[in-house]
Image: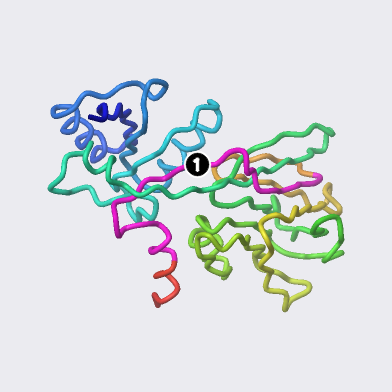
Amino acid sequence: MSKPLRLALMPSDTDRAHEAAAALREGADFVSPDQADAVVVLGGDGHMLHCLHQMLDSGRVIPAYGLNYGTVGFMMNKPKSSRTLEERVARARPLVVTPLEMTATTGSGSEESFFAINEVSLLRETRQTAKLEVAVNGKVRLPELYCDGILMATPAGSTAYNLSANGPILPMGSNMLALTPISPFRPRRWRGAIIPDHYEVEFKVLDPEKRPVAAVADQKELRDIQAVRIRVARDKQLQLLFDPGRTLEERIFAEQFHF
């Protein structure tokens, strides 16, 4: 007989999530995340990203099962079911998500690294367009890109900011990344690229004093950027849990047929 799953509960700050958490606590005992086999996340996609980043920062990564008490809920499961929460988590199908690692060099010469589950974005800080050099695996592909910004998205994040910027939807398991410009001015007809996820991309900020640029890795932002390197962090894999037939892979694929 298998031992019961030890579950942690991480609700968002919304009233809906706190009400759901109170109801779940009446029927089950929960443990702290450092003692749990899996974590149950109550909220929306933003709160799921927050919880996944907390695990990355702590160094202890456990499977995450989300219940949607937010808006879109791409990374979440439906709240209601005839099964108990422990039964749902035990039956859930795992999906591995591999984040990006962004290493940014600032104007002071210091380096800082952050992880991104959805995307890394470079964004202009002022009314001046950003002026960037884009290199892939050490080879300069775009000597000068004038734009409002540029982003690199994972398949999991390809239906978020990337899609809003007219980037491509990437199926889970495609082993590809989307490189998408934001309002490109020159070269005007460049619409981005799809690159293998074992490639490393580097952005250099040209004329950073006149055209300052910020770098954002999901929810973390750095300003006064000189250069950014991005690679897939294969040693930091995360695991999302989904009810059978409701996987993120299917939702992302289906999004290609929505108009």
Q: Is residue 208 left or right of residue 195?
A: right
Q: Estimate the x, y position of residue 153 in percent, counting from the top left.
A: 59, 57
- Is residue 233 part of the magenta span, yes or no? yes
Crowd class of label 1 (few under 14; some 14 to 19; many from 20; radius 10 Å): many
Q: Estimate the x, y position of residue 145 in percent, counting from the top left.
A: 79, 65
Q: Quadrant of the N terminus?
A: top left
SS assignment at label 1: strand
Residue 110's place in the image compared with 196, above or below, is above
Residue 99's place in the image compared with 169, above or below, is above
Nearer to us in this view, 164 or 75: 75
Say which residue appears at 65% left-offset and 48% top-offset. Answer: 232
Say which residue appears at 66% left-offset and 67% top-offset. Answer: 194
Instruction: Give the quarter of the image for residue 252.
Output: bottom left
Residue of label 1: 238
Q: Is residue 44 left or right of residue 169?
A: left
- Is residue 147 part of the magenta span, yes or no? no
Q: Estimate the x, y position of residue 71 in percent, counting from the top left.
A: 33, 53
What colouring does the structure picture have? Answer: rainbow
Q: How many marks?
A: 1
Residue 70's place in the image compared with 19, above or below, is below
Q: Estimate the x, y position of residue 258 in percent, counting from the top left.
A: 39, 75
Extent of the magenta region: 226-252
Say which residue appears at 26% left-offset and 30% top-offset. Answer: 2
Nearer to us in this view, 168 or 215: 168
Spot the residue most to the front.
Answer: 1
